[in-house]
Image (tube, grey):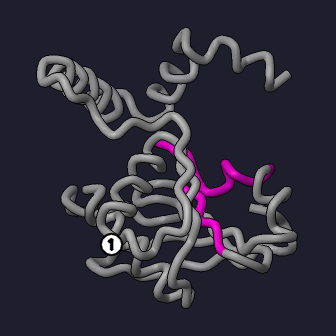
Amino acid sequence: MLSGRVAGFNVDVGDGLTLHVTRSGTGPPILFLHGFTGLAATWTDLVGRLENRYSCIGIDLPGHGLSSSPENSVRFALSQTANDLAHVLEVLGIDKAAIIGYSLGGRTALRFALEHPERVAALVLEGTSGGIADSRQREVRRESDDALARMIETEGVEAFVNYWENLPIWESQKSLAE
């Protein structure tokens, strides 16, 4: 996340899966969870502003960044990832943390809060929903997600990222990178 002050290491969470963890700063812990195709380094700028008052912990979610990718797809389930995050906090000696999650990271944070409420000091979610209530809309979304998964499998992650970054929803963000 930040050069020179970050300790990066892997934590074995079982079944041959390791999660890459970065940690910087001191103080009350904040756990940062990135979105789909992201990595802990996504939070570098924010961590740089907070690490003088907080212990900032970033985790590359399973199959992302420097974390390993589980062979068994069941290991990608949010409930399993929530338990893996609890294990990482145990390894770090952290009883309770604030959690900041974006998109997939936000959904993971929600599941963590449901599975381990006693370990959550605060929850900040960006670009996250608790799910789709309407069954028909949920089915349409599932079909859309399945089509995207097939695209990744047949065309690769790079093609998916190119497609995703060029969706109209991101148009306003392109000028920020200039």
Residue at 21% x, 56% y is 73
34 falls in the magenta region: yes
Q: Is residue 34 visible?
A: no
Dividing the picture into quarters, in which one does residue 104 lie?
Answer: top left
- Judging depth in this view, the residue of 151 and 113 nearest the camera is 113
Dividing the picture into quarters, in which one does residue 18 lie?
Answer: bottom left
Numbered-mark total: 1
Q: Is residue 21 visible?
A: yes
Q: Is residue 79 above or below residue 11?
A: above
97 falls in the magenta region: no
Residue at 78% x, 79% y is 26
Q: Is residue 175 above or below residue 24?
A: above
Q: Is residue 141 above or below residue 68?
A: above
Quarter holding the N terminus?
bottom right
Residue at 27% x, 28% y is 145
Find disc 1 in the rendering and name its residue.
Answer: 83
Q: Position of residue 153 (x, y in %)?
A: 29, 35
Q: Position of residue 175 (x, y in %)?
A: 79, 16
Dividing the picture into quarters, in which one does residue 108 lie?
Answer: bottom left
Left or right position of 24 against 64: right
- Judging depth in this view, the residue of 79 and 161 nearest the camera is 79
Q: Position of residue 147 (x, y in %)?
A: 25, 23
As helix, strand or loop, the secondary structure at mark 1 comes to: helix
At label 1, which amino acid type do we have? Asn
Residue at 81% x, 61% y is 50
Q: What is the span of residues highlighted in magenta in the rendered image?
A: 29-45
Quarter holding the C terminus?
top right
Q: Label 1: few (<14), some or many (≥20) within 10 Å?
A: some
Q: Position of residue 125 (x, y in %)?
A: 53, 45
